[in-house]
Image (tube, rainbow, N blue to C red):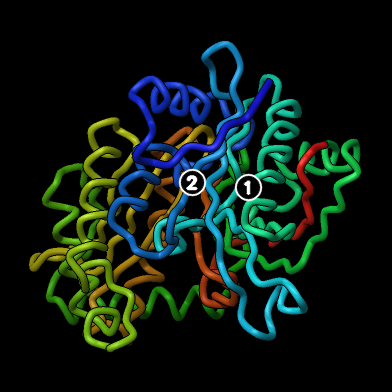
Amino acid sequence: MKARVVTPQELTSRDVAAWEACAAAAVEPNPFLEPAWLLPALAHLDESPRPALVLAEHGGQVYGCVPLFESVPEQDGIGANGVHSVINTRVAPTAVPVGTPLVAADRGAEALASMIVEIGHVAAGHATELVVLEWMVAGGPVEALLEEVADRMAVKLVQFETWERGFLRRRAGEDDYWLGAIGKNRRRTIRQHRRRLEEAIGADVTLRVATGGEAVEAFLRLEMAGWKGHDPHGLALGRTPATAAFFREACAAGLDRGRLFFLSLEGPGGPVAMICCVRAGEGLFAYRTAYDERLARHGPGVQLFLDAMAYFDRATDAAWFDTCTTPGNEHLLGLFPDRRRLATFVTRVRPAP
């Protein structure tokens, strides 16, 4: 098996089809590195100059895929001591809340080995040896394969930092298990907030599953109406034409394939909170959340996530639900009963002789 480097512009339709097949057969699902999501991100988001993809291939099939770009670390950051740049694998941070490479369940170790060799060539071409794999799922099957391959190839893999996000695992035969992290006092407070939320809007709120293009626009409007849209440093997707174009294109592809939907907590005037959900393999990913900040004191986001956990259990066959939060989100850590650990791994690679 060999790996090759290709830019997004150089991909053929056959390449994309083989990449999609690899994603469908991945030992660990990651929808954010699939073509339908990542290619719009690379086309519209100016976050990673000159990105490339490393594809592990054999017999016309792709067995592994990881994106790459060269970055210059901060003066006190990783690699600052004598290293001018690093190769980073999380190429579009706005779009990619999970950085685990795609690795096929079949021949995954071979795929990783070939990608490590090719990444060594890429690093050498940039006069660096340092590679940073950000936001990988720690303790998962891809990390296990990577550790095995790195050990065999005498490549030192260092876990640089680790953190946790809220997570939910299905528990067969247990009623309301998603409430396990919430104490009685907080449950009472949440119920009070629900009543006050409904009093504020003059009606009951209900959960709706939205699967049309109008939901994309409703989400963009809801996010723009809050601080993410008004603050100069806000990260609302509707703030720039480029980020909005990425979101619309990625959502359109997901909606067409039945892999994306919005959970919307609604009253008579429309959504008070929304989650953009993406399905991949046995997992459900809460890519992004927005809520009506005029109702913030009543916790519409908490109400939506509680309803979303119940929906996950009762209306899907997913095995787990990933909140996709950034580090330090204590709010959802206190709401969700389980944890997913993510880590940044650092390694030095050298091209094979």
- Outermost residue on the left side: it is 269
Rounded to the nearest angstrom, the CA distance separating label 1 from label 2 is 10 Å
Which mark is drawn over residue 52? 2
105 vs 213: above or below? above
Locate residue 134 relative to residue 299 in the image: left or right.
right
Which residue does the image show at 58% across and 72% down from the upper left? 72
Q: Secondary structure beneath disc 2?
A: strand
**Amino acid at pointer 2:** Ala
Q: Is residue 144 visible?
A: yes
Q: Earlier in the sequence, mark 1 or mark 2?
A: 2
| Badge 1 vs badge 2, beta-carbon distance below 8 Å | yes
In front: label 1 or label 2: 1
The N terminus is located in which quarter?
Answer: top right
Locate residue 277, reporting x and y percent: 37, 49
Asked if residue 194 lies left or right of residue 129, the reply is: left
- The residue to which callout 1 is attached is 122
In which quadrant of the rendered view does residue 335 lie?
bottom right
